Image (spheres, rainbow, N blue to C red):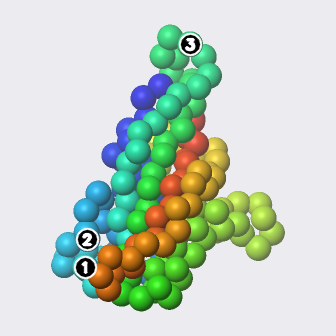
């Protein structure tokens, strides 16, 4: 199955923005017009790292896909980068109070649904000059619904 990676990435960006209240760029720094905070620090950058499939052979449409995303949180202080990364982690992994669902849903196009999410890798914080970056990598598991 081929999952529309760009559409899933856009849905993930909306989830990150909802959880963090900060702008998130797609493979680049958010623009000054990006909502809700433009290019003002702290912000997030989402990178698509590809997808793999599992399930039935020969490209069966009922197969599942695992999409990898890297999120880099950029801030002007260690606290800003770390707390921003905490919000991104909550966006991907936060559960509702009763644990029955995700606190922040990832809304995909019709025909696809998120089956699971996990933290694939967390590289932590680095600093270059006076800019702090916190790198995390998440997997989103998607299946067809039709």
Which mark is first along the chain, 1 or 3? 1
Of tags 3 and 1, which is closer to the observer? 1
Give the residue at the far right of this rendering.
Answer: 98
Position of 98 compared to 77: left or right?
A: right
Which residue appears at 78% of the width and 64% of the height? Answer: 99
Give the residue at the far top of this rendering.
Answer: 58
Which residue appears at 52% of the width and 80% of the height? Answer: 82
Mark 3 falls on what kind of element?
Answer: loop
Q: Nearer the viewer, residue 129 or 141?
A: 129
- Depicted 66 relative to depicted 77: above or below: above
Badge 2: residue crowd in 10 Å (few <14, some 14–19, many ≥20): many
Which mark is first along the chain, 2 or 3? 2
Q: Nearer the viewer, residue 54 or 130?
A: 130
Position of 24 compared to 39: left or right?
A: right
> Residue 144: where, in percent of width, then height?
54, 33
> Residue 60: where, in percent of width, then height?
52, 17
Q: Which mark is residue 57?
A: 3
Which mark is first along the chain, 1 or 2? 2
Which residue appears at 61% of the width and 56% of the height? Answer: 119
- Depicted 104 relative to depicted 74: above or below: above
Badge 3: residue crowd in 10 Å (few <14, some 14–19, many ≥20): few
User: Which residue in the protein does label 1 denote?
Assistant: 39
Marks 2 and 1 in Cβ contact (< 8 Å): yes
Tell me the distance, in whole angstroms, between the alpha carbons under discs 3 and 1.
44 Å
Position of 21 compared to 101: left or right?
A: left
Mark 1 falls on what kind of element?
Answer: loop
User: Which residue in the protein does label 2 denote?
Assistant: 30
> Residue 95: where, in percent of width, then height?
70, 66
Q: Quadrant of residue 41?
A: bottom left
Check the picture and name the quadrant holding the C terminus: top right
Mark 2 falls on what kind of element?
Answer: loop
Tell me the distance, in whole angstroms, between the alpha carbons under discs 3 and 2.
39 Å
């Amino acid at each position: 199955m081929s999952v529309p990676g760009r559409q899933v990435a856009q849905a993930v960006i909306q989830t990150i923005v909802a959880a963090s209240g900060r702008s998130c760029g797609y493979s680049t720094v958010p623009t000054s017009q990006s909502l809700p905070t433009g290019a003002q620090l702290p912000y997030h950058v989402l990178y698509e790292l590809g997808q793999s499939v599992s399930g039935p052979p020969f490209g069966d449409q009922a197969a599942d896909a695992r999409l990898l995303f890297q999120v880099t949180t950029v801030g002007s202080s260690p606290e800003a980068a770390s707390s921003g990364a905490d919000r991104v982690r909550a966006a991907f992994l936060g559960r509702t109070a009763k644990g029955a669902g995700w606190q922040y849903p990832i809304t995909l196009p019709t025909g696809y649904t998120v089956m699971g999410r996990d933290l694939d890798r967390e590289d932590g914080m680095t600093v270059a000059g006076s800019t702090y970056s916190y790198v995390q990598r998440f997997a989103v598991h998607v299946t067809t619904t039709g």
